[in-house]
Image (spheres, rainbow, N blue to C red):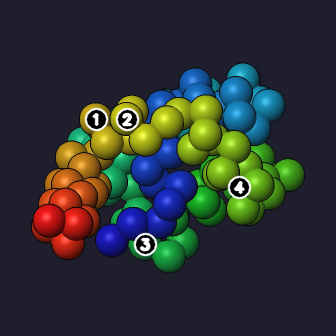
Amino acid sequence: MYEFEGLLFSDLSGVARAIGRAGTEEDLRKIRSAFSTPEWINDSLDTAPSKRIAKLLPAYDKPEHPLLAALEIGLDTIRRECLLFDAWIKRLEALTAEALG
């Protein structure tokens, strides 16, 4: 379901800071506002989150920029904004807790 960059739409200022382009935050906000959650931004191959970002920023460097953005945003923010992703992580955490007994 996910392209990693979709989750990064959890914190638009974090994405803009990480890629060094504060002026793109409003353009990112326009994309984000069209969806109920960042999780749904990945709606086709032509409009995948990474392609949307690259269209705004031709110098977008995958994987460097997404990694920097994720570090800037943090997993807690992503989990708070992306509830389906959070539920998946909780299931993984439960499996780990079970395995460690």
Q: Are marks 4 and 1 in contact (CB under 8 Å)?
A: no
Mark 1, secondary structure of its residue: helix
Q: Amino acid at mark 2?
A: Asp
What residue sits 61% from the left and 33% below the top? 72
Q: Which mark is residue 54?
A: 4
Location of residue 43 in the rendering, given as x and y in whole percent from the top left corner: 37, 66
- Of the residues tagged 4 and 1, which is closer to the observer? 1
- Of the residues tagged 1 and 3, which is closer to the observer? 1
Which quadrant holds the C terminus?
Answer: bottom left
Say which residue label 1 marks: 80
If you read the primary sequence from the N terminus, does the residue marked by circle 2 or circle 3 appear first? Answer: 3
Q: Amino acid at mark 4?
A: Ala
Q: Which mark is residue 76?
A: 2
If you read the primary sequence from the N terminus, does the residue marked by circle 1 or circle 3 appear first? Answer: 3
Q: Amino acid at mark 3?
A: Ser
Which quadrant holds the N terminus?
Answer: bottom left
Mark 2, secondary structure of its residue: helix
Q: Amino acid at mark 1?
A: Arg
**Vertical relation: 10 (above or below) 46:** above
